[in-house]
Amino acid sequence: MILLRRYGTLLALALIVLVFTIASPNAFGSMSNLVNITQQMALLAIVAIGATLVMVLGEFDLSVSAVVSWAGIAAAALFAAGIAVPVVMIVVLASAVAMGAISGFLVARYKVPSFIATLAFGTVIGGLTFWVSNGATMFSGIPAGFRDLGRGTLAGVPVPTLWLIGVAVIFWLLLDQTEFGRRLYAIGGNREAARLVGLPVRRDMVVAFALCAALAGLAGLLLTARLGSAHPTGGGGYLLQAYAAVFLGMTAFREGEPSIPGTLVGAAIIAVVSNGLTILGVPSFLQDLLTGAIILAAVLVRNFGRDSD
Amino acid sequence: MTSDSFLALGGLVKHFGATKALDYADLALRAGSVHALVGENGAGKSTLIKTLSGLYQPDAGTIRLDGTEVTIDGPRAAEALGFRFIHQELNLVPHFDAVGNAWIGRRHPRRGPFIDRRAMRAKVADVAARIAPDLPLDKPAARLTPGQRQMAEIVRALMDPARLVVMDEPTSSLSEGEAERLHAIVRQLSAEGCAVLFISHRLDEVLDLCDSYTVLRNGRTVGAGRVADTSRAGLVAMMSGTAGVSPSALRPPQPQHPEEAFAESRLEGRTVDVQQKLPGTDALRPSRRPSGPPQDVAVGALPGQSKGRAEKPVLATDLAFGPGDSRFAFSARPGEIVGLYGLVGSGRSSLLKTIWGATPGRGLIAINGQVPGHGPAGRIAAGCAYVPEDRRREGLANALSIESNLSLAHLPDFRAFSPLPMPSRSKIRNFARATGARLRLVAGGLDHSPATLSGGNQQKLLFGRWLGRPIRILLVDEPTRGVDVGAKAEIHGEMRRIAADGAAILMATSDIEELLALSTRVLVLHAGRLVAELDGPSLTRAAVVAAAFGHAPDEQMPPSERSA
């Protein structure tokens, strides 16, 4: 039982992979499909890693999907105006950082509940995105060089997977191995105590929200690169899935704290279930149903374990 | 003793896994008596009460009420038997007033389909008039003082006739005056024939208030009888298990390796505490001063005016603090322990927070003659340290490990490679081990949550986090609230050591024995104003209490106040 509680989520991932491999050894279990799954989960996982930072603080950022959409539209609009790729990327990421910093500032300085602050500010960003795009899909003028950042392979590895590996390593180091990461966990654990021992609580919170939005912005850029177009609600699906990944990840390792490895496991479960069920030809409503059931089961198993303590 | 008792618990046993929380505990209560239940933290008092309230079912043993054996299978059953519980953490709905709180969980009186507020209030006013006529009935609980909240709890407990009221450390967060008020209520209850089971770490209070006592140690009843037949020393000896043994014989072996200190079980840890306990309790006499630098501040001296002193003040403040244009001006020298006393609400905690930079204030603060940087971080850089009042709310992050909590305040000290802000786990662990050994921390493991520690050990953590670097000034708010006798003595010893190492300590406490035992000088606040500064022969219990209640004789007033 202790084993199940500690590693239940990891076991579940292994079990799900096993079941799909048995059910469809050639299509699901093939190496190329498994590599493909890492590509499919890449954008979700990048958004979820950003959400993890904010969850470590004990806060939510509900504006991530709005930032994903914004980044795609803003990039497409700038490309349409003929601006060079590096400049576009820097400008778009900077705008995302600014948006996150504003949310973080509202939460840290004015103590607006993050749930409300980011919901409201996300709505503002959504409005901005519609304004810029006129509510239409934008696809003109996106350079091929930019598109290659979100598609194809490098040394046999899909490019989005490489982005994910890079982001995951950097943010794992940041959260697990640096003073900043330790401070975030301390602030999430007891904000008043963190303040009273002199930690820069406000600054760290603003930085965490800004980093979360930066990753959402990066995901938006990669999404546009992959699709070759940008839709004003293109990021809509990422919000709930990202938090589902973080919550699943919190059940994956001890202490039940959000962590980067946990979030990767969570994102992998979501991606594997979706991929496997699609291959098996299961209708998509059943996929949602199953994903939801898995999240509930993971949380319940952990809480049952806690009660018996 | 059991012949005339209405309630008798016999041979109660309760296991939690391998731990025996209760190990043949007995308790007998006479109707209308005030009975003290004492013991160190972890002795089994809470488990015993939870058994009585039906939250725990004993593994063995009997509970007899009026001679018949009863089973208490839940809080409702305990309620039906006439048992009432006032828990250490009060359970009031903050935005309900005393009336609303008193009716929670009861069938509200109705007029037609609606709640009859007038009848509700009348009933509560009736109960309050008997025991706490001065309790404001219409103020939300959040705006009541801690003492008033306690009264509201008691009123709620007595809405139906009660035979037994259990109070778990009711005075630990009350000031002297509020505690006196509570004592009067306890006596009143007793006079009405309701027994009171009174749990307290304040032994003077026990000796003063209670008729009879039961002492628990390691889950077992080790002593019981009439308070009149025992003494403070007798109770301490029973609690710590040192009766008839000289303290020096109990000196524990010094652990060779710090790990061994942590490997020791909780029970062993408690006996380790003993060695420092007796000196600590002896020191609770105002006449015995801790050795330290000579008293060097004349009564009423202004900061910076005491000329010809060997040591300059390490801390000097002149703050706009308190009502109107009153100020808080004082200074402290290395090696001093300055006590800060006042009733709850007198501004002690907010004063410390202002000096710490955690709440904004106006005025001057100088540390070693220099104005420190902004906020707590600036104070830390100047060599200041702070131990907050409420360890759970303001001190510890329970989601983090013990060692993470210890390292939080000065993370940059633990870098593996100093230009990179990446802490080294082994450096943090070494610091945590050394600190744990110095403070005799009893913990299952350094990677456990601080929530697994006893209150005393949690409190030690709050001191321990500052021990990595030199402390010039230590601000302490309630050093030992809710801490057992052994850990209290150890914390007092640590504070004296920190002072002897050259720090000035400013200590706010509502425990007057602690104040008198530790302080070389005492500042008394009343309603936000500094009303007295006492030291040397003027520092007596009576003078402190008088000043705190606002009856300070004129000559004790600092000149700045006198001229105002």
Image: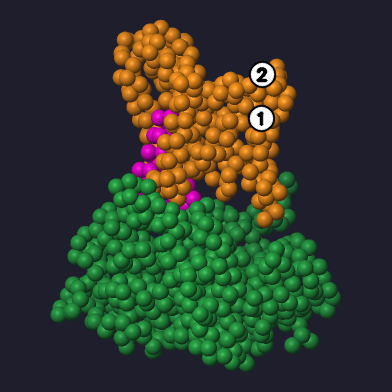
The chain that appears orange in the image is A
At a point 32% along the width and 77% down the height, the residue shown is B500
The label shown at residue A27 is 2
**What is the x, y in percent for residue A304?**
69, 47
Secondary structure under the numbered disc 2 in the rendered image = loop
- Give the colouring mode of the picture: by chain
- Up-down relation of residue A28 to residue B354 (above or below): above
- Up-down relation of residue A251 to residue B561 (above or below): above
Is B418 on the left-hand or right-hand side of B549? left
Category of crowding for the residue at label 1, using alpha-carbon neighbours closer than 10 angstroms: few (below 14), some (14–19), many (at least 20): some
Q: Residue furthest front?
A: A155
Q: Is residue B415 magenta?
A: no
Considering the whole magenta stretch, tell me its main secondary structure.
Answer: helix
In front of the other: B536 or B427: B427
In front of the other: A175 or A212: A175
At a point 40% along the width and 57% down the height, the residue shown is B427
Q: Chain of mark 1?
A: A
Q: Chain of mark 2?
A: A
Q: Residue furthest right?
A: B68
At a point 57% along the width and 29% down the height, the residue shown is A241
Q: Which residues are magenta?
A: A187-215
Identify residue type, mark 2: Ala
Is A264 on the left-hand or right-hand side of A25? left
Residue B370 placement: quadrant: bottom left
Can the viewer see residue B11?
Answer: yes
The chain that appears green in the image is B
